[in-house]
Image: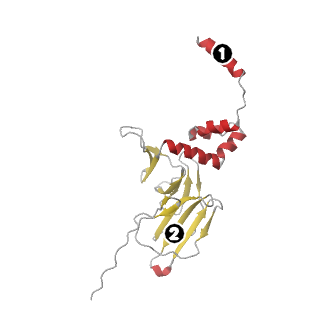
């Protein structure tokens, strides 16, 4: 029976049109995992162009994010990924991510994430990388050219829908405040840093230098200390 079934399948396949409309191909590819899409880029030049298109990547990520949410946890031992919808008894979580650009003796710090891209820095906070954990692709960013060592610094990574651009903010607050501060924004479209023309004022104490992206804007948690009462 299995032999007859195989012959029938071959005959049916020969009578089936080999060409599928492109919109059907796109819908099929959008439902595949990222690891499969990485391999399928080598099927043809057309598929490589289609899968590499930023619009396709956005649609694929939007569809994938509707199915599951993952949490990235950074520590000195590395970066782990946790499926937020997995049951507690699931032994497969959390999974360890191999960071291809991590150097010996330097732990990776997560600056922020957006649309499947993760912005990280090494311990020195001068080496910034954009990393796609799903594909393993990464790119090192140019040096911002401002001093961050030994100073109070802030970071922020996010997507600007007005310009359709990913941006990274790096700022420091020098001590004492009279010496001023520096701030730069990296644009992925221009692939260059741009200095913030106006000086930055230190708004107060923050426990984490990485900003949180919410509704298209970066936010930081601040703790303001009341001024001491003057003696009468």
- On screen, residue 77 versus residue 141, left or right, reads left
Q: Earlier in the sequence, mark 2 or mark 1?
A: 1
Q: Secondary structure at mark 1?
A: helix
Residue 8: assigned label: 1
Q: Secondary structure at mark 2?
A: strand
Percent x, y for residue 120? 51, 56
Q: CA distance from mark 2 to mark 1?
A: 67 Å
* Rendered image coloring scheme: secondary structure
**Residue with the most extreme bottom position:** 232
Residue 135 visible in the shown view:
no
Image point 60% across, 46% down: which residue? 59
User: Is residue 54 shown above or below 148?
Assistant: above
In the image, 121 versus 20, the foreground residue is 20
- On screen, residue 180 versus residue 92, left or right, reads right
User: Is residue 23 shown above or below 164?
Assistant: above
Residue 18 visible in the shown view:
yes
Q: Quadrant of the C terminus?
A: bottom left
Cβ atoms at labels 2 and 1 below 8 Å apart: no
**Figure quadrant of residue 42:** top right
């Amino acid at each position: 029976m299995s032999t007859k079934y195989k012959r029938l399948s071959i005959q049916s396949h020969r009578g089936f049109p080999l060409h599928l409309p492109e919109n059907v191909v796109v819908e099929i590819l959008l439902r595949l995992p990222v690891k499969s899409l990485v391999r399928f880029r080598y099927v043809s030049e057309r598929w490589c162009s289609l899968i590499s298109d930023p619009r396709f990547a956005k649609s694929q990520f939007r569809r994938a994010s509707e199915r599951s949410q993952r949490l990235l946890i950074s520590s000195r031992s590395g970066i782990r990924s946790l499926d937020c919808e997995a049951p507690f008894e699931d032994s497969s979580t959390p999974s360890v991510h191999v960071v291809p650009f991590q150097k010996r003796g330097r732990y990776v710090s997560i600056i922020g994430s957006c649309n499947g891209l993760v912005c990280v820095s090494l311990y020195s906070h001068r080496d910034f990388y954009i990393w796609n954990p799903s594909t393993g692709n990464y790119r090192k960013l140019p040096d911002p050219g401002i001093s961050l060592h030994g100073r109070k610094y802030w970071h922020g990574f996010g997507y600007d829908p007005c310009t359709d651009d990913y941006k990274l903010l790096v700022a420091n607050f020098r001590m004492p405040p009279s010496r001023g501060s520096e701030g730069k924004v990296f644009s992925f479209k221009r692939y260059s840093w741009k200095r913030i023309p106006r000086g930055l004022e230190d708004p107060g104490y923050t426990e984490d230098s990485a900003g949180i992206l919410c509704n298209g804007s970066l936010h930081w948690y601040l703790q303001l200390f009341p001024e001491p009462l003057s003696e009468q």
